[in-house]
Image: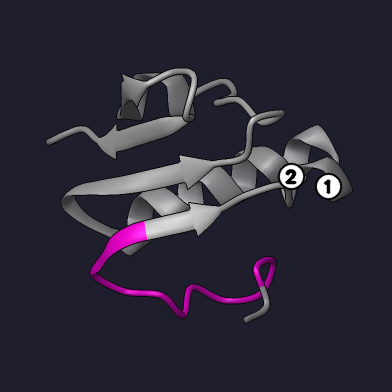
Amino acid sequence: LDLIGDDSIKEADVVICRNVFIYFNRSLQEQLLMKFYRSLKAGGYLVMGKAETLLAEAKEIFREIDSSARIYQKKET
């Protein structure tokens, strides 16, 4: 899967992206977080690696479920 390319994931229950963001600059990280948001079903989950955190707008659109495990849930719009 090309993370930077088009939006190919649709209606996912869970997106697991662990220890990937370290390879991208901040701008690309923010773009990927928005892509993951669009890819998830309402109430879907995003799981990130221990060294990764939500950035910018993503802090407003994901709800923290478990900060130590880096588990977030897509907020209802």
* Label 1 to label 2: alpha-carbon separation: 5 Å
Which residue occupies 36% across, 20% down? 60
Looking at the picture, how far across and down is residue 47, in whole percent? 45, 44
Give the amino acid type for the residue marked by disc 2 in the picture: Phe
Density class for disc 1 (Cα within 10 Å; few <14, some 14-19, many ≥20) is few
Q: Which mark is residue 21?
A: 2
Looking at the picture, how far across and down is residue 42, in whole percent? 14, 50
* Nearer to us in this view, 74 or 68: 68
Q: Which mark is residue 14?
A: none
Specify start and end residues of the magenta stretch as a single range.
3-14
The extreme front residue here reads 69
Looking at the picture, how far across and down is residue 61, in whole percent? 33, 29
Res. 10 image quadrant? bottom left
Q: Which residue is mark 1?
A: 24
Which residue occupies 20% across, 32% down? 75
Density class for disc 2 (Cα within 10 Å; few <14, some 14-19, many ≥20) is some
The dominant secondary structure in magenta is: loop
Q: Is residue 71 left or right of residue 77?
A: right
Q: Are marks 1 and 2 in contact (CB under 8 Å)?
A: yes
Looking at the picture, how far across and down is residue 7, in whole percent? 48, 73
Q: Is residue 17 left or right of residue 70?
A: right
